[in-house]
Amino acid sequence: VQWSSSAVSQRPVRLRVVTSNRTGLLADLTNAFQNRGINITSAHCDADDSDRAVNTFTFNVKGLSQLNSLIRALKQFKGVYDVDRVHS
């Protein structure tokens, strides 16, 4: 069996993004995914009384460079406190 060198393998990833509960920040975060051609397959967002939000995104990436590019972009937004990969 031979595999095409152009075959693209997608890997599932889950990220936890801790942010302020700023209006428009969720749109900023999801645009970072869109700008990198990454489709979010699941999103769970919770805000608490301390004006913080925990956003968990599940998606597929083509490789480590695409994932690292996304993480760097997410960390650049005002109000993003932490971005961590969730290993299940």
Image (cartoon, helix red, strand yellow):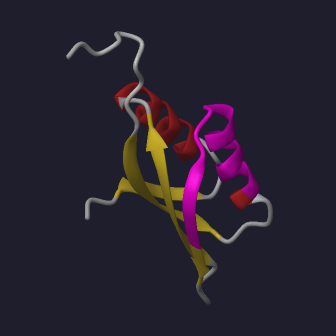
In the displayed orientation, state which residue is furthest to the top.
5
Q: Residue at x 55, y 56 (%)?
A: 41
In the displayed orientation, state which residue is furthest to the front.
1
The part of the chain drawn in magenta is 27-44
Question: Closest to the observer: 18 or 85?
Answer: 85
Left or right, 29 with respect to 15, comes to right
Residue 56 placed where, x, y %?
49, 65
In the displayed orientation, state which residue is furthest to the right.
23
Q: Quadrant of residue 38?
A: top right
Residue 55 placed where, x, y %?
54, 67
Query: From the image, which quarter does the N terminus lie in?
Result: top left
Q: Residue at x 57, y 65 (%)?
A: 43
Question: Closest to the observer: 34 or 52?
Answer: 34
Left or right, 16 with respect to 29, comes to left
**Up-down relation of residue 23 to residue 31 (above or below):** below
Residue 49 placed where, x, y %?
61, 89
Q: Residue at x 55, y 63 (%)?
A: 42
**Up-down relation of residue 6 to residue 64 (above or below):** above
Asked if residue 80 lies in the magenta stretch, the reply is no
Asked if residue 36 lies in the magenta stretch, the reply is yes
Left or right, 79 with respect to 22, comes to left
Q: Residue at x 71, y 44 (%)?
A: 31
Question: Closest to the observer: 12 or 57?
Answer: 12
Query: From the image, which quarter does the C terminus lie in?
Result: bottom left
In the displayed orientation, state which residue is furthest to the left.
1
